[in-house]
Amino acid sequence: MSNISYITIYNNEGMFFDTNHRSLIKLSPRVSGIEYQDLMAPTRPQSTVFSSDFGDIVDFLMEHLKSALGAEANHRKTFYNPADYHSWRRSVEFSDYDVAWYVNIEYTDDKIVTYVCTNSAPIPAELDQLELMVKEALNIAQN
């Protein structure tokens, strides 16, 4: 994990299913930091550094990306520099509005691994569980 600089998890379920689930989670291994933003509410992101739950959250995500969660992404790509990633994003047939969820893993050597799902199926249970873990780590009241 020491070579990962950031992990970003975007959940856009609310756009497809009219639910209250639209969130952005950022994980920063350098400081064991967690940031959570509810994109359906006009609140500021909530964050912490040196979370004791950080390792469990990242391990959970990485394990599931290697199996069911990763398999549900209909676009799985590795880029060796940010320019190639951004070029790909500009050239794809879908727009940001079509993205149901994505996970981007950015490495210290500029490599980016992305998992993008544009299927209009409910968000995988693993992402719901991850969001719950993040909210618990940040002591965010559950709705």
Image (spheres, helix red, strand yellow):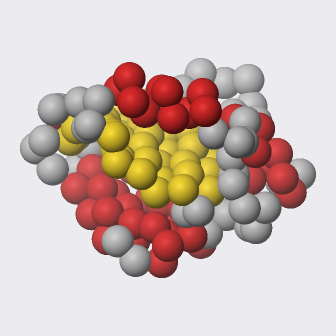
Residue pictured at 33% horizontal, 40% vertical: 79
Residue pictured at 73% horizontal, 23% vertical: 42
The one nearer the camera, 7 or 132, is 7
Residue pictured at 35% horizontal, 71% vertical: 66
Image side of residue 88 versus residue 34, left or right: right
Image side of residue 2 versus residue 107, left or right: left
Residue pictured at 27% horizontal, 63% vertical: 59
Residue 123: give x, y in percent of width and height: 67, 63
Residue most extreme to the bottom: 68
Residue 143: give x, y in percent of width and height: 71, 53
The one nearer the camera, 124 or 106, is 106
Residue most extreme to the left: 2
- Position above or below: 130 against 116: below
When asked about the image quadrant of residue 31, the answer is top left
Residue 72: give x, y in percent of width and height: 56, 70
- Position above or below: 18 against 111: below
- Position above or below: 131 against 96: below
Count of marks placed on residues: 0
Image side of residue 111 versus residue 35, left or right: left
The one nearer the camera, 116 or 20, is 116
- Confirm whether residue 122 shows in the render: yes
Image side of residue 52 versus residue 92, left or right: left
When asked about the image quadrant of residue 60, the answer is bottom left
- Confirm whether residue 128 shows in the render: no
Residue 21: give x, y in percent of width and height: 72, 50
